[in-house]
Image: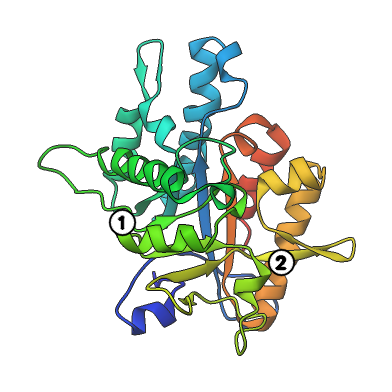
Amino acid sequence: MTTIWTKLALSSLLICSALIIAAADERPQEPVAVDIIIGAELHPDSSEMDPETQWDMEVGSIIEMLNRIDPLGLNVTVCVTGDYVNKIAGNAMYKLYVTSVGSKYNHELAVYGMTSGEELGTMAYGDQYSRLMEAKRLVESAYICGGRTIVAKGLFPQSFSASETTYRILERIGIDYIAVYQPEILNQPGHEDESWPRPMEGYDLYTVPISSSPHEGELAPLSDKYSKEVLGLSGGEWYDLLVAEFEDCREKNEPMVVIFTNVVTGGDEGYMDAFKRFVGFS
């Protein structure tokens, strides 16, 4: 299984792992490199749920998604918020589950911010620094003594919210890459419409562009949360959007990066069905 980040491998930095899905067709086709990101965060209404419901929504849904991926021997990036690692629901410690996820060599753990819904890009340096440092510390603390050491190298900011202040902090705390969906970064001269990871000009960081797909005349990031909460798409419509982008990436020989979350995919049967169908799409 090769990784999607060929260009980064050539520069001796492997930052993400890939799910390779080969599209079936009557004629020979190049495989499409699809990087599936799973976001683990606390549900905004979790305080109103009983512990069992909280666990099913916030943890059980991730187990269900990984159980679809892991038997195929594929790699996946799981990004986790700091408060998710800290949570205890009834007798269940979420940190133990995150530790289990991080112990598998086909899983990469990355930082998803400190809390759900945070907007790093609007915060002052001190607020961002304390949040990112604590989130990174918590994610990296989820390991078994004597087992695989966790080093979080990536940040997937909530709502893609980041600023130049964020980039400076990431350099300082040892984060190597940031997922972006920001035109001012993605459309740097010479990189228009380029979908591969690349160095960020002026910073010791790499950017990982989140894929986008046309919807009603505008580009939409491939995020289940954006699809449901902003576009109002059903699970079936979300699946159609994923397939359309897959075909476009196959045509252009580009990677596809898509984010699924426990809050949306885990809380909507239609979206979970879309996830499973897409993973099995070939």
> As rendered, which of 3 and 278 lies closer to the eye?
3
Category of crowding for the residue at label 2, using alpha-carbon neighbours closer than 10 angstroms: few (below 14), some (14–19), many (at least 20): many
- Picture disc at residue 173: 1
* Rendered image quadrant of residue 252: bottom right
Can you tell which of label 2 and label 1 is closer to the viewer?
A: 1
| CA separation in Å, label 2 and label 1 | 34 Å
How many C-alpha atoms fall within 10 Å of the one at disc 1: few (<14), some, or many (≥20)? few
- Relative side of 147 to 9, left or right: left
Q: Quadrant of the N terminus?
A: bottom left
In the image, taking residue 282 as reference, residue 108 lies left or right, namely left
Q: Tell me the residue that label 2 is attached to.
A: 245
Q: Is residue 235 visible?
A: no
Q: Which residue appears at 40% of the width and 10% of the height?
A: 90
Q: 197 or 1, which lies in front? A: 197
Task: Give the structural element (helix, strand or loop) at label 2.
Answer: helix
Q: Circle 1 sits in a helix, a strand or a loop, which is it? A: helix
Type of amino acid at the residue the image marks with label 2: Glu
| Dot 1 amino acid type | Ile
Picture coordinates of residue 128 (x, y %)?
A: 45, 47
Is residue 96 found left or right of 76 in the rendered image? left
Q: Position of residue 175 (x, y in %)?
A: 35, 60
Residue 9 falls left or right of residue 255: left
Q: Nearer the viewer, residue 75 or 154?
A: 154
* Sequence-wise first label, 2 or 1: 1
Estimate the x, y position of residue 35 in percent, counting from the top left.
51, 62
